[in-house]
Image (cartoon, grey):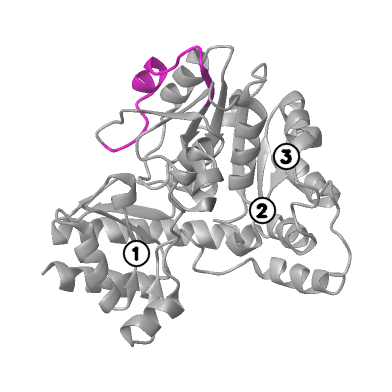
C-alpha cells in the first residue's frame, strides 16, 4: 500500500471513477477513421437552444465578474415557468451536484442508508459510497424498472433517502401513476423521496399519462423533484440542474451549496433556453419519431428493445455487449455498453439525428449479422 493509499478514506479507495462515454476525437485517433457518430451520452443532437447560444455569447463579455450567487433571474424564470415558489428551488452544476447536496445534508456517514433499485442512475450509488453511507438496491420489474413493492420492502429505520428516476436512465422504464402514488404514500416519515425527472420533457410528449411528481408535492415536505437543462434544452455542457422541494429542505441544501456553483454564462443560457419552446418541441418530436424507428429496427434484427420514455433506448443484443460495442466503434458508432450496471448483453443507444440513427441501425445490423 502506498503512502497516499494508507491515509485516504477506505470508502474513497474502494470507489471506481465514473467512466463517461468515449469522446469522438479519441475514437477517431485510436481507430484511424473520421466521421464518427457519438450516440452514447443522451445528449440533444439538435444542439443547444439557439436563444441560449445568443444569451451565452453576450454573457461572455462580463465573464470577469462573479455570477449571481442566488441565480436570481434564472430562479425567477424557473419559478414562473413551473409555477412554484422561488424559495423552493435549489440550483446545482447539473443534477449530480443536487444529489450530492442531498446526501451531504441528510445522511450520516457510517450510519444511514440510501435506497434505490437495480440498474438506476449510477450517481446515486457513487455519491452515497463517497459519503461513507450504505447503498441499498431493490429488485426490478421484467422491463428493468422500479418495482415499488420491492423497493418499499427494503426500507429500514436507517433509510434516509430514496432515489427513483422517472423515467429511469439507463433502462428507460417509467412509473405508472398508481405506482408513483403507492411509493409516495408508502414512504415513512424518516425518509426523503427524490424523483429524478431529467427526461421529463420527452416523457410528457411520448406518454400523455406520465405522472409528474410535483402534482403530489402539496403536504409532502419530504418530496424532492430533480430537473435539468442538459437533455431537452440541449445544455449538457453548461451544467445546470435544479431541485424542487419544500422551503425547509431548500434551506438546508443552500447552507452547503458551493458559492457561485451555477456559473454566469450557464445561468443566462438556461434562462434563455427556458423560453425557447420551439427548440424543445423539435427535440422531443425528433426523439418520439426516432425511438419508434429504433424499436422497429430492433424487431427486424431480432434483439430486445426495452420500453423507453427518455431520449435513448436500451437494447439486449443477446451476446457479450463489449464485443458488439467494439465492433460498432470500428464502424464509427459510439454507444454505451452497460456492463458497469451488471447488464452484460445490453447497449444503450442515445437518439441522434435521423441520419445518425439510420447509420447506427445499419451498423448494428452489419455487426450482428
Does residue 204 appear in this view? no
* Mark 3–mark 1 distance (CA, rounded to whole Å): 32 Å
Does residue 326 appear in this view? yes
Question: Circle 1 sits on which residue?
Answer: 335
- Give x and y (percent) for residue 185: 51, 14
* Mark 2–mark 3 distance (CA, rounded to whole Å): 11 Å
x 41%, y 18%: residue: 152
Question: Circle 2 sits on which residue?
Answer: 240
- Give x and y (percent) for residue 251: 78, 30
Q: Is residue 152 magenta?
A: yes
* Mark 1–mark 2 distance (CA, rounded to whole Å): 24 Å
SS under mark 2: loop
- Give x and y (percent) for residue 154: 39, 18
Q: Is residue 361 left or right of residue 71?
A: left
**Magenta-tinted stretch:** 143-161
Q: Is residue 275 left or right of residue 128?
A: right
Amino acid at each position: 500500500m502506498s503512502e497516499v493509499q494508507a491515509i485516504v478514506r477506505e470508502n474513497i479507495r474502494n470507489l471506481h471513477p465514473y467512466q463517461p462515454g468515449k469522446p469522438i476525437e479519441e475514437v477517431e485517433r485510436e481507430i484511424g477513421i473520421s466521421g464518427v457518430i457519438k450516440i452514447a451520452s443522451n445528449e440533444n443532437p439538435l444542439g443547444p437552444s439557439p436563444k441560449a447560444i445568443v444569451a451565452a455569447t453576450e454573457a461572455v463579455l462580463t465573464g470577469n465578474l462573479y455570477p449571481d450567487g442566488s441565480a436570481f433571474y434564472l430562479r425567477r424564470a424557473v419559478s414562473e415557468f413551473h409555477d412554484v415558489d422561488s424559495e423552493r428551488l435549489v440550483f446545482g452544476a447539473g443534477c449530480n451536484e443536487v444529489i450530492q447536496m442531498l446526501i451531504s445534508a441528510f445522511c450520516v456517514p457510517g450510519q444511514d442508508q440510501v435506497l434505490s433499485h437495480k440498474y438506476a442512475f449510477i450517481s446515486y450509488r457513487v455519491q452515497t459510497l463517497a459519503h461513507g453511507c450504505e447503498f441499498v438496491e431493490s429488485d426490478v420489474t421484467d422491463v428493468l424498472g422500479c418495482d415499488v413493492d420491492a423497493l418499499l420492502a427494503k426500507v429500514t429505520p436507517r433509510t434516509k433517502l430514496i432515489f427513483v428516476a422517472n423515467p429511469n436512465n439507463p433502462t428507460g422504464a417509467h412509473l405508472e401513476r398508481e405506482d408513483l402514488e403507492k411509493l409516495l404514500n408508502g414512504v415513512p416519515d424518516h425518509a426523503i423521496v427524490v424523483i429524478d425527472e431529467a427526461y421529463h420533457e420527452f416523457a410528457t410528449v411520448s406518454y400523455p399519462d406520465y405522472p409528474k411528481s410535483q402534482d403530489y408535492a402539496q403536504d409532502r415536505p419530504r418530496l424532492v423533484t430533480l430537473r435539468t437543462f442538459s437533455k431537452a434544452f440541449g445544455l449538457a455542457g453548461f451544467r445546470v440542474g435544479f431541485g424542487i422541494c419544500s422551503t425547509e429542505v431548500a434551506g438546508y441544501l443552500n447552507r452547503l451549496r458551493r458559492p457561485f456553483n451555477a456559473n454566469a454564462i450557464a445561468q443566462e443560457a438556461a434562462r434563455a433556453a427556458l423560453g425557447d419552446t420551439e427548440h424543445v418541441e423539435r427535440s422531443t418530436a425528433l426523439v418520439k419519431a426516432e425511438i419508434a424507428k429504433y424499436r422497429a429496427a430492433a424487431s427486424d434484427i431480432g434483439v430486445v428493445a426495452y420500453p423507453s420514455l427518455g431520449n435513448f433506448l436500451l437494447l439486449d443484443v443477446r451476446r457479450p455487449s463489449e464485443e458488439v460495442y467494439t465492433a460498432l466503434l470500428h464502424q464509427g458508432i459510439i454507444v454505451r455498453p452497460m456492463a458497469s450496471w451488471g447488464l452484460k448483453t445490453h447497449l444503450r443507444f442515445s437518439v441522434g439525428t435521423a441520419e445518425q440513427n439510420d447509420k447506427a441501425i445499419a451498423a448494428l445490423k452489419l455487426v450482428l449479422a
